[in-house]
Image (tube, rainbow, N blue to C red):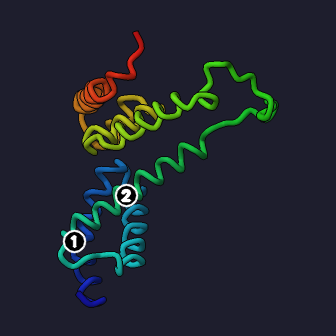
């Protein structure tokens, strides 16, 4: 597919992309920003598109990943650090992760298990882990509150099953 065909296909997806952006952001202005960012990212990465891959799916994946990355960036920016705390001399207990290779391995396994979750349950679960309330997740993902609660419940159940060897007695 040449550059002009690529751009025409991308322009043809703009309405579909906008609908998906609104579903992700639940805000028209944020959706427009996400649409613009996605369009630029797709155009900048045209050479990474493989012709036999679902073009719409590829573009929507780029949009979803941008949304998730932007969300994590916002969470990091909103994290408050107490400037009066001596960060270099914090009281670290013996139960700290840093001293135990077993605990580091367990954290890696947990992270891997979360990453392997289906996006349908992983995204609400990750938002919940990052401090969002159920109703905020429902608004953000444009889903009913009960659906969000169910997906988080199913994510927990799946993780409990996958990580049953790490549960404490």
Label 2 environment density (alpha carbons within 10 Å; few <14, some 14–19, many ≥20): many
Residue 49, quarter of the rendered image? bottom left
Q: Which residue is mark 2?
A: 31
- Is 98 on the left-hand or right-hand side of 126? right
**Residue 131: image tag:** none
Residue 157: x, y in percent?
A: 26, 24
Q: Nearer the viewer, residue 168 or 57?
A: 168
Q: Which quadrant holds the N terminus? A: bottom left
Q: Label 1: how many residues lie within 10 Å, few (<14), some (14-19) or many (20+)?
A: some
Q: Does residue 145 appear anywhere in the picture?
A: no
Q: Extreme top residue here?
A: 169
**Rendered-image quadrant of the C terminus:** top left
Q: Is residue 140 left or right of residue 91?
A: left
* Residue in the foreground of this view, choosing between 36 and 91: 91
132 w.r.t. 71: above or below: above
x and y percent of residue 31 in the render? 37, 58
Above or below, comparing residue 51 to residue 109 in the picture: below
Quadrant of res 142: top left
Q: Which SS class for mark 1?
A: helix
Q: Position of residue 154 (x, y in %)?
A: 24, 28
Give the residue number, with chain letter if any, for mark 1: 55
């Amino acid at each position: 597919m040449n550059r002009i065909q690529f751009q025409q296909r991308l322009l043809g997806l703009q309405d579909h992309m906008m609908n998906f952006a609104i579903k992700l952001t639940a805000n028209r202005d944020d959706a427009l920003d996400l649409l613009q960012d996605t369009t630029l990212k797709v155009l900048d990465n045209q050479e990474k598109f493989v012709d036999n891959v679902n073009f719409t799916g590829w573009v929507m994946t780029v949009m979803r990943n941008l949304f998730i990355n932007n969300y994590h960036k916002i969470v990091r920016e909103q994290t408050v650090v107490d400037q009066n705390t001596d960060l270099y001399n914090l009281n670290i207990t013996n139960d700290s992760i840093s001293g135990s290779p077993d605990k580091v391995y367990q954290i890696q396994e947990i992270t891997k298990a979360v990453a392997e979750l289906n996006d349908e349950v992983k995204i609400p679960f990750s938002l919940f882990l990052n401090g969002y309330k159920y109703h905020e997740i429902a608004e953000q993902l444009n889903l009913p509150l009960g659906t969000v609660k169910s997906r988080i419940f199913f994510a927990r159940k799946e993780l409990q099953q996958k990580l049953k060897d790490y549960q404490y007695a």
